[in-house]
Image: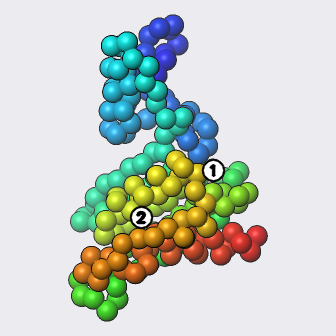
Amino acid sequence: CQTSVKDIYAVGDCTQYVDFVTGKPLLVGLGSMAVKQGIVAGINAAGGDAKLPEGFLQTRTTQLFGMEIAAVGPVLNQMPDKKPVTGKFTGSSLPDYFPGGREITVKVLVDPKDGTLIGAQAIGEDAAQRINVFACAIMNRMSANDFVKMETAYAPPIAPTLDPISIACDVARMRYGRK
């Protein structure tokens, strides 16, 4: 990232970068983004011409008391002027009839103007992996409607027929469709 001094660049937790969804500068503070910045800086220092993505998504995850928590994009209180449409679903990581499933809650945020996915949060089994799928969708400007059409893997001991991410998007799509 270019600093306020010409031809002086900085990478890592001390830098600001543009939020992909809001367009506002934010402190990065995420290891994944710091590594990407370092790779780009190294390539360019060696004479290359690498570029960072046009913005970052704040894709993050943690675990508290054995519960996996993950999110991508801004949360509701970070964009009070946008008033996103939300969709939320709580279900199981496996089909209801198959033993061993664990609870997962997924919430999506959709732009009220065009139905584009702008954020998501998940709590529960494999939350980070589900949020990684949303990160890809947001970077590619997919809508909740596009996302509902996505095919997901199914096998009773591994994954449900309809993943909670698809169902949460369907809830948002139905709400968006009524507006």
Residue lying at the far top in this picture: please name it.
Answer: 6
The percent position of residue 9, horizontal first and vertical second, equals 43, 15
Query: Crowding at label 2, few (<14), some or many (≥20) Cα neighbours within 10 Å?
Result: many
Residue under label 2? 122
The percent position of residue 161, horizontal first and vertical second, equals 40, 81
Q: Please tell me which residue is depicted at 39% across the width and 17% down the height of the picture.
A: 48
Residue under label 1? 79
* Quadrant location of the C terminus in the rendered image: bottom right
Disc 2, SS: strand
* In the image: residue 100, left or right of residue 153: left
Q: Please tell me which residue is depicted at 58% across the width and 56% down the height of the picture.
A: 142
Q: Please tell me which residue is depicted at 43% across the width and 35% down the height of the picture.
A: 28
Gap between marks 1 and 2 measured at Cα: 19 Å
Q: Look at label 1 and name its amino acid.
A: Met
Mark carried by residue 163: none
Residue 147 visible within the image: yes
In terms of sequence position, does the residue under pointer 1 or pointer 2 come before the other?
A: 1
